[in-house]
Amino acid sequence: MKKVLLVITILTLFYSTIFAQQPELNGISNGMDTIIENTSETSSQYFEIDLIRGTQNPITKKIPLKVIIKPKINSSKTQILWSVPTVFTVSKNHPEFVSLNRDQTYTYTASLEPKKAGQYSLSVNVISWQTDSNKSNSANTSININNSLVVTPIETMYVIYIVLFVLLVLGGIAISIFFLSKAVKKLVKKAKIWFTPPY
């Protein structure tokens, strides 16, 4: 048990050191687009859009995305398009066309699975199909993927997820060993009784 605790402590210190070496993201302002950490906010006379990138899943490598839309117009036929490089597999959790009402807030999600390292730009486009002319707005962000297909800089929650996963695995192993040793001891006692000749 002491060895297991020692391994857990070493792994925790290791991942804490990795995280401490990662640079922090600074806010970047560019016209009407404001990128703060993993959030891209845009506003136009038709739509307010927030594009938020969640924490990558350390097991599946999938990256969750969330777009929050607040329309300033009524739009019965609104198209949501994700513009993503082909190195990602995109899984959308919403229909392509939705109906939006003015001044209401709507949230839609998707996930990306990276296939190749590199720096990429991605965006979500919201288009209102009108009889006279289409109204649209978009939100953009960038993402860096390293050779291990991990988003960089490495985020706090990503490190926490890995540590929790390792602790869960080690805890499961420790519990299995404990109950296995108990079972073996019982079997040994029974075996001694079975093989002890009667007097």
Image (cartoon, rainbow, N blue to C red):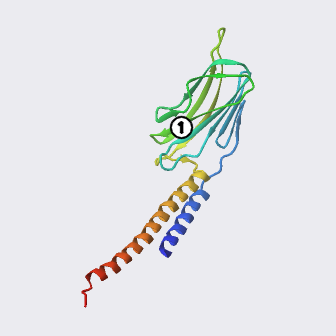
Asked whether, in this view, residue 150 is left or right of residue 157, the answer is: left
Residue that lies at the very extreme toward the bottom in this rendered image: 199
Residue 142, position in %: x, y? 59, 37
Q: Report which quarter residue 159 is drawn in.
A: bottom right
Q: Is residue 141 above or below residue 187?
A: above
Check disc 1 and report its element: helix, strand or loop: strand
Q: Position of residue 177 (x, y in %)?
A: 42, 70
The residue that mark 1 highlights is 111
The percent coordinates of residue 156 (x first, y second) are 61, 53
Which residue is drawn at the image coordinates 43% and 66% (left, top)? 176
Q: Pick the residue in front: 120 or 52.
A: 52
Residue 83 image-quadrant placement: top right
For image coordinates 64% across by 42% down, the residue present is 38
User: Which quadrant is home to the C terminus?
Assistant: bottom left
Nearer to the camera, 76 or 119: 76
- The amino acid pointed to by label 1 is Ser
Q: State the residue at coordinates (54%, 59%).
A: 163
Q: Nearer the viewer, residue 191 or 153?
A: 191
In the picture provided, is 89 more to the left or to the right than 102? left
Farthest residue in the front direction? 199
